[in-house]
Image (cartoon, helix red, strand yellow):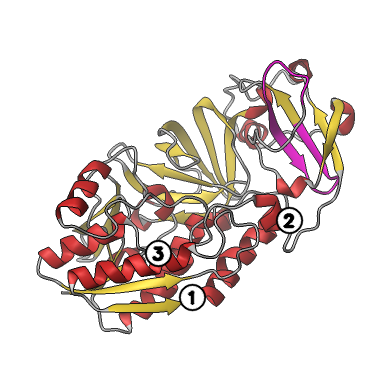
Amino acid sequence: MKIAVGLSGGVDSSVAAYLLKQQGHEVYALFMQNWHDTTGTLYGDCQWKDDKAIAQMVAKKLEIPFYYVDLSQEYSQRVVDYMFNEYKEGRTPNPDVLCNREIKFEVFLQKALELGVDYVATGHYCQKESFVNSKGEEVFRLIAGSDTNKDQSYFLCQLSQKQLSKALFPIGHLNKKEVREIAFNASLPSANKKDSQGICFVGKIDLPIFLQQKLEAKEGEVIEIFNDFYSNYPNNYIGYNGLEDANLKVLSNKLSYQKEDGKVIGKHQGAHFYTIGQRKGLNIGGHKEPLFIIDTDVKSNLIFVGEGQNHQGLYRKALFIKTEDIHWIREDLELKQDDIKEFYLRIRYRQPLQKATLFMKEEGLYIVFEQPQRGITPGQFAAWYSSQNELIGSGVIE
């Protein structure tokens, strides 16, 4: 088969290309550059050039053709503009999920198919299986990677059946140690390269500086909310188990705080630069335990914080996803109105799977967790899995 590998210069994609070549496939290396602006990045403008140079060396070592594609315009429009808009509205996006859906397995996939390849392979730690249904149609399953510490299925939670049909994940059955060993034994130039960090294709950033490209700094107040505030809410998020329709809405709604609910303890430079659960960047002392952001109000330009990682404001029992923001990888398992089903959820990368019940209603999907969850954040993705670690669907948290 003809297979294009998204060769990033990292060890994972390098080993993916190596394994495919060993299996006798006709392999092509494609290097993507998706970002040029270095404003707010912590490593300057040389990182992508280093990555490209290593990718070229890997391709030469494997004796496979090397191609370079610049997708920066599409990345800016589909991922970065989305990021700015979400932060402006006080939400916290996940650009890596968008990058996979919109760039790697959409624009990049189309570029690769133009070369006449049959599939596109990446170095993601996840697995793909398929079966033929009663209608004779092939149905694709996205399975978590064997290495639970590196499983990246969450980042692929928005892929479609069409995208999965053309995707291959050659290292999904391996753990990171095994991948490194293969790279060393094959003398791949990327064998010692550290894993990349930060935003997909942008790198590690100073978020406020990065966002100030389009979002203005604006001084506002930091309000501390104390735990006795929650005594006014007998049906608060901790331990409240009423599951009638009205109670589902109560459970899933994020508490809204007012300035008079707490005490002004400091200043900040813009509520849109911060996110729920964030600890760093406040620079406010005088507390025994660290302060965590429990809510932001971009309209009033206020940040609300609580002391300690167990502050009640950090925890919620449920979340809501609007109908238009629900995505099913397994379309054949889509819940219909008034369906109720248990799944295993995660609301961030590497979070252990959490048991939860999904309630499908006309207005959207209510997800009620068995245990209250810390840091449920609007704009992030919730992804639900079967008990066999198959990713079934996902959606954007309200």
The quadrant the N terminus occupies is: bottom left
**Residue placed under numbered mark 3 in the picture:** 51
**Residue placed under numbered mark 1 in the picture:** 71
Element marked by disc 2 = helix
**In this rendering, position of residue 174 left or right of residue 370:** left
Query: Quick check: can you spot residue 7?
Result: no
**Residue placed under numbered mark 2 in the picture:** 88
Q: Is residue 256 above or below residue 77?
A: above
Residue lying at 49% horizontally and 41% vertically, measured from the top left: 348
Element marked by disc 3 = helix
Residue lying at 44% horizontally and 35% vertically, measured from the top left: 351
**First reached walking from the N terminus: tag 3 or tag 1:** 3
Please say if the residues under marks 3 and 1 sit with CB atoms less than 8 Å apart.
no
Q: Which residues are magenta?
A: 285-304
Q: Residue 238 location, x and y as percent?
A: 61, 21
Q: Nearer the viewer, mark 2 or mark 3?
A: 3
Q: Residue 86 location, x and y as percent?
A: 67, 56
Q: Quadrant of residue 261?
A: top right
> How far apart are the two marked residues, 2 and 3, measured between alpha carbons?
32 Å
Element marked by disc 1 = loop
